[in-house]
Amino acid sequence: MKNLDRIYVAGHRGMVGMAILRAIKALGLPKPITATRKEVDLTKQAKTARFLETERPGVIIIAAAKVGGIEANRSERGDFLYDNMMISANIIHSARQLGIQRVLFLGSTCIYPRMAPQPIPEKALLTSELEPTNEGYALAKITGLKLCQYYREEFGLCYHSAMPTNLYGPGDNYHPQNSHVMPALIRKIEEARLRNSSHVTIWGSGTPLREFLHVDDLANGLLFLLQLENPPNWANIGSGEEITIRDLALMIKKASGCQAELKFDTSMPDGPPRKLCDTTLIRSLGWKPQISLADGIAATIKDYRAKYTHREA
C-alpha cells in the first residue's frame, strides 16, 4: 500500500468505520483522516470536493452510508437511493478529479438479484430483478460500484469495491424499527430477559436463511484488499455460512440467557428467502474470516449490555 499516512475513512463513526479504525490501529498504521458530518456533508458535491482537495488523502475507504433494516429500506426508498448515491458519487468523482490513486468503495450483497443463484457469485450482478424492499439502497450501491469500475477503466486509477454480507458487532444500530436483523434480535431478546417477558415477537416467518460476518472480520478483509496491487473490481466478503432467522434467534436467546418463548409475526415481510454470498474469489486471494458466529454473538451481547443496560453478562 502506498500513502499509508494519508488514509481517509469516510463514515468513521459508523459500525464499519469504527472497525476500520480499530484494524488500522492494530496494524500500527498512522492515524487516518476522518471528518464528522458537521465538518463535511458528503451528500454535497462542492463541500466534499473542497474537503478532499484540502486533505489530499492517498487512499480513501468509503464506509459512509445511510443504512437501515427492512422497514426503513421499504418506507424510505427515495432517501436511501438519493443519500447513498450522492455520497458515493461525490467522493469517487472528486477523488478522480484530484488524481487520488486508490479508492475502496463499500457496498453490500443486497446489490444482487432477489433470486440470484446461491451462493451468489460476483457475476450475478444485474442479471435479474432486485429485492423490492431494499431496491433504493441497492441501486445506489450498484451506481458506486460501477462508477469505480468505469473510472478504473477510463483513467487507470485503482478504484474497486467490496460487497459484505450481513454485518454485526460493536457499534451496531439497535433502533427498534430501523435496525438490521441481528441487532434487532439482540435488543428484543435482551429486553425480554430484563423484563422476564413470557415471549418475544420476531418479524417474519423465521425461515429465511442469512449469512453473518463480524464487522472486525470485514475491516481486516478491507485492509487485505487494499494490500493487493491489482484487486478485483469487486469482491464479496462473507463467512460462507448461513443460518435461519429462527435458529439465529435461538442462538442469541441461548447466549443471552433469556427464557422467553419465541413467536413469529408472519404478517411482516421476510425479504429474500436466502442470501449467501460466494466468497471463492477473496478466499482464493488469501483472505478468510476468523471470528465464529457463536463467539461473535457472545461478544456482541456483552458490548450491547455495556452500552445499553450497564449490566454484566
Image (cartoon, rainbow, N blue to C red):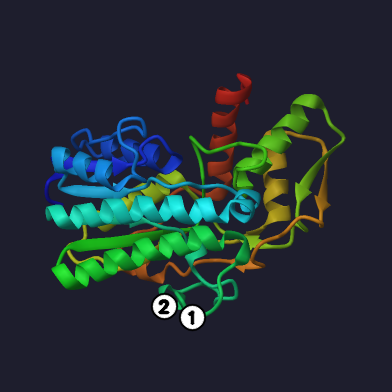
Identity of the residue furthest to the right in this view = 198
- Residue that carries the numbered disc 2 in the rendered image: 123
Assign the C terminus to one quadrant of the image. Answer: top right
Instruction: Quadrant for residue 154, please give it.
Output: bottom left
Q: Nearer the viewer, residue 199 or 45?
A: 45
Identity of the residue furthest to the top in this view = 310
Callout 1, which amino acid? Thr
Q: Can the viewer see residue 211 in this picture?
A: yes
Pinpoint residue 198: horizontal percent, then vertical percent: 87, 35
Q: Is residue 93 left or right of residue 173?
A: left
Instruction: State whether residue 54 is above or below residue 81.
Output: above
Callout 2, which amino acid? Lys
Measure how far apart labels 1 and 2 are at the Cα level. 8 Å
Q: Nearer the viewer, residue 74 or 240?
A: 74
Pinpoint residue 210: horizontal percent, then vertical percent: 61, 60
Instruction: State whether residue 198 is above or below residue 80.
Output: above
Is mark 1 in CB contact (under 8 Å) with mark 2?
A: yes
Q: Can the viewer see residue 101 in this picture?
A: no
Instruction: State whether residue 296 is above or below residue 148.
Output: above
Residue for point 60% across, 34% down: 301
Pinpoint residue 234: horizontal percent, then vertical percent: 34, 66
Query: Dot 1, crowdedness within 10 Å: few (<14), some or many (≥20)?
Result: few
Query: Dot 2, crowdedness within 10 Å: few (<14), some or many (≥20)?
Result: few
How many numbered discs sit on the rendered protein? 2
